[in-house]
């Protein structure tokens, strides 16, 4: 069993409580995260694109200390009104994301773009449907980024103020994972892939992270396997899926073929053990004592 898996010590007790009907599942909050890729230089040790990752501060209530991609929850205001939009129509996005309405599709895609700007300083938007912002490092951009983080400014207001349209064609939907029912903080998270726009660069600006890295997906997965990097199952799974691609553009092109069926962990009682599993992802299956003192997962 890999040593880098993120299994909080309270999970066994919560799994037992859920199985006994003593725990009511929390409704998951909609969220989005982006696997931001760039092609490495000719001297790179590992072939293929590298992905931008950040390490969540250990003080964070959810996944503290784990490596993840830029992302976060949907701002309800992103459902309120249609924004400047480029790329596939919202009806197509709704079908791809598995949501019921075009406004919900817009909100999820907005969350992906907004959170990438908030946490990495990279903006997938431009003044026209065929252009993208070239530089977001000025003081005026930073003022707007901080206002978005504080929720003093909605993403629609930000785009309108800047005269920008969201470039949804720069994103590809890759996967969807839902936090297990026994977690107190739950997210229904859509994973996207995107290439770093020409002229832009990432910045270490997230208040939720204490480190950022560009790393080859295969290298990150190997370091997880070695117990060097802490990650949650969806992060590891998406890293492994990205590893075969030779360029960022190739990975983005492959997004349409990815399975968007939601992945939700299941917990079941088998004899004297509770078995925790993610359907279709056997490497994460975990066995915990069905009764005991509530210690960490075995």
Image: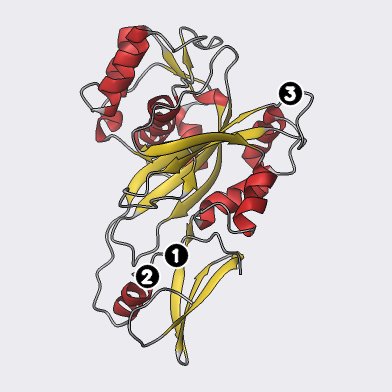
Q: Residue at x 42, y 55 (%)?
A: 178
Q: Secondary structure at mark 1?
A: loop
* Mark pair 3, 2: CA separation: 42 Å
Rendered image: mark on residue 41: 3
Rendered image: mark on residue 11: 2
**How busy is the neighbourhood of tag 3: few (under 14 within 10 Å), some, or many (20 plus)?**
few
- The answer to whether mark 3 and mark 2 are in CB contact below 8 A is no
Residue 115 appears in the rendering: yes
Q: Secondary structure at mark 2?
A: helix
Q: How is the image coloured?
A: secondary structure
Residue 154 appears in the rendering: no
Which of the 4 image quarters holds residue 183?
bottom left
Q: Position of residue 103 (x, y in %)?
A: 34, 33
Q: Secondary structure at mark 3?
A: loop
Which residue, as the protein is rendered here, is positioned at the far left?
A: 152
Up the image or down, 165 lies above or below 249; here it is above
Q: Residue at x 33, y 8 (%)?
A: 140
Q: Earlier in the sequence, mark 1 or mark 3?
A: 1
Q: Nearer the viewer, residue 104 or 101?
A: 104
* Mark pair 1, 3: CA separation: 36 Å
- The answer to whether mark 1 and mark 3 are in CB contact below 8 A is no
Which residue, as the protein is rendered here, is positioned at the far bottom?
A: 271
């Amino acid at each position: 069993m890999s040593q880098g898996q993120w299994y909080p010590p309270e999970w066994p007790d919560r799994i037992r409580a859920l199985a006994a009907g003593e725990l009511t599942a929390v409704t998951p909050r909609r969220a989005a995260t982006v696997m931001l890729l760039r092609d490495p230089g000719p001297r790179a040790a590992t072939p293929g694109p590298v992905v931008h990752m950040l390490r969540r501060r250990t003080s964070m209530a959810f996944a503290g200390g784990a490596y993840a991609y830029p992302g976060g929850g949907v701002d309800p205001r992103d459902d309120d009104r249609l924004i400047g939009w480029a790329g596939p129509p919202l009806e197509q996005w709704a079908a791809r994301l598995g949501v019921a309405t075009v406004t919900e599709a817009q909100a999820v895609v907005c969350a992906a773009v907004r959170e990438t700007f908030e946490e990495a300083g990279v903006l997938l938007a431009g003044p026209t449907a065929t252009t993208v912002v070239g530089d977001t490092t000025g003081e005026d951009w930073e003022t707007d980024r901080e206002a978005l983080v504080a929720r003093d400014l909605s993403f629609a207001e930000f785009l309108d103020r800047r005269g920008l349209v969201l470039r949804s064609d720069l994103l590809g939907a890759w996967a969807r994972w839902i936090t297990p029912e026994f977690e107190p903080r739950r997210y229904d998270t859509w994973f996207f892939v995107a290439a770093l726009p020409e002229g832009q660069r990432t910045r270490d600006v997230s208040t939720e992270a204490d480190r950022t890295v560009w790393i080859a997906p295969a290298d990150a997965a190997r370091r997880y396997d070695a117990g060097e990097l802490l990650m949650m199952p969806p992060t590891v799974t998406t890293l492994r899926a990205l590893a075969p691609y030779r360029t960022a553009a190739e990975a983005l092109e492959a997004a349409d073929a990815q399975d968007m069926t939601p992945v939700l962990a299941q917990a079941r009682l088998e004899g004297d053990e509770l078995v925790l599993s993610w359907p279709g992802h056997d490497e994460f299956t975990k066995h915990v004592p069905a009764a005991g003192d509530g210690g960490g997962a075995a």
